[in-house]
Image: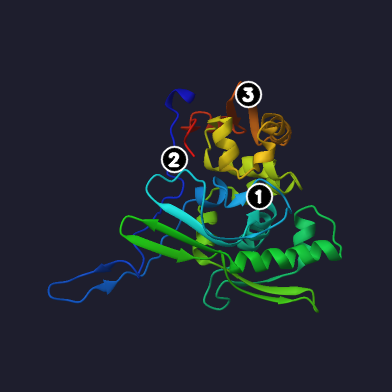
Amino acid sequence: MFDYAHGSDSNGAFVSLNSYTAGETGFLDVPRPRKEFRQQKLGIYLLSDLFSASFMGKSHFVKDRQLVDLARDKRVSFTGETFDQWDLDVLLYCAMRTVTNRDSQGKIQVNPADVLRETGLRNFDENRDRVYASLFRLHTGSLLIEGKGYRYMTRLIDRVLLDQSKECCLVEVNGDVVNSLRNECNLRLAVESRFSMKRSGLAKWLHGAVLVFKGGFKADIGSLHSLCGASNRTRHLFPHMLGKALASLEEAGVITSWHIEGRKLMVLPGSRQMIETACGFIPSGTV
């Protein structure tokens, strides 16, 4: 299985240049803008430090901070209040319930109590406030993706109405984000197993890595530490933290086995059908 390990351009795009940067030109015609934006692969959300491997941690404002990711041909930077795995939980909850049709235009009603119940957390005032705060961060944060000859600017949630007096929100998730997530087969089952991890930020981040690298992966632990956005204070404890998180993934059936030897980690997927799938490889010095 690991004889054919490979890296992945996890932040690559499925479609052509967006309407702000590309055009089609006919004979003596002015350029005609294309209608497609750049839909990102899952790696930009699940295999980078955009959503760090903490849970309900302190957030701070950053400006044009370059993400740690596996992209080879583009630069991805973020401006806004930093995200962690709690914010990804909220985004996934909203994206999974978004119906894209002409009548709703992608808007959904979100009840903070329902979000907490679905993610396995207690429903009380402080946690409901955390739902509102996460929706605010997800809307105000912005991504800048720069490649060869183009720049793509986007955000994860386009619009949000927070009505704390009625404990209800109206949310419109970016359609490209919804489509990227829904291109993943069995995502609903994956999200259910993810939510069972509750407050384990590192287990949830690794869950996302397994979702991207369906055949499992090999990784240098130092590179993995940087990629998941763990703090420098945890560098020496990180192998132990990895072991606990991976044990919970194995117990949940997300992976079949894992092994740490020195500074190297090997993870095998939960489905035997995926063992023949090409795996991921994150060598030392990758990030």
The residue lying at 64 percent from left, 56 percent from top is 83
The residue lying at 51 percent from left, 47 percent from top is 43
How far across and how far down the image is residue 196, in percent? Answer: 75, 46
Mark 3 vs mark 2: which is more N-terminal?
2
For label 1, the residue is: 191
| Vertical relation: 256 (above or below) 186 | above
How far across and how far down the image is residue 253, in percent? Answer: 69, 34
Disc sitting over residue 8 in the figure? 2
Judging depth in this view, the residue of 43 and 118 nearest the camera is: 43
Q: Are marks 3 and 2 in contact (CB under 8 Å)?
A: no
Circle 1 crowding by C-alpha within 10 Å: few under 14, some 14–19, many from 20 = some
Report the amino acid beneath label 2: Ser
Mark 1 vs mark 2: which is more N-terminal?
2
Disc sitting over residue 260 in the figure? 3
| Vertical relation: 221 (above or below) 70 | above
Report the amino acid beneath label 1: Val
User: In whole angstroms, how far apart are the C-alphas of marks 1 and 3?
Assistant: 26 Å
Report the amino acid beneath label 3: Ile
Horizontal side, residue 219 vs residue 16: left or right = right
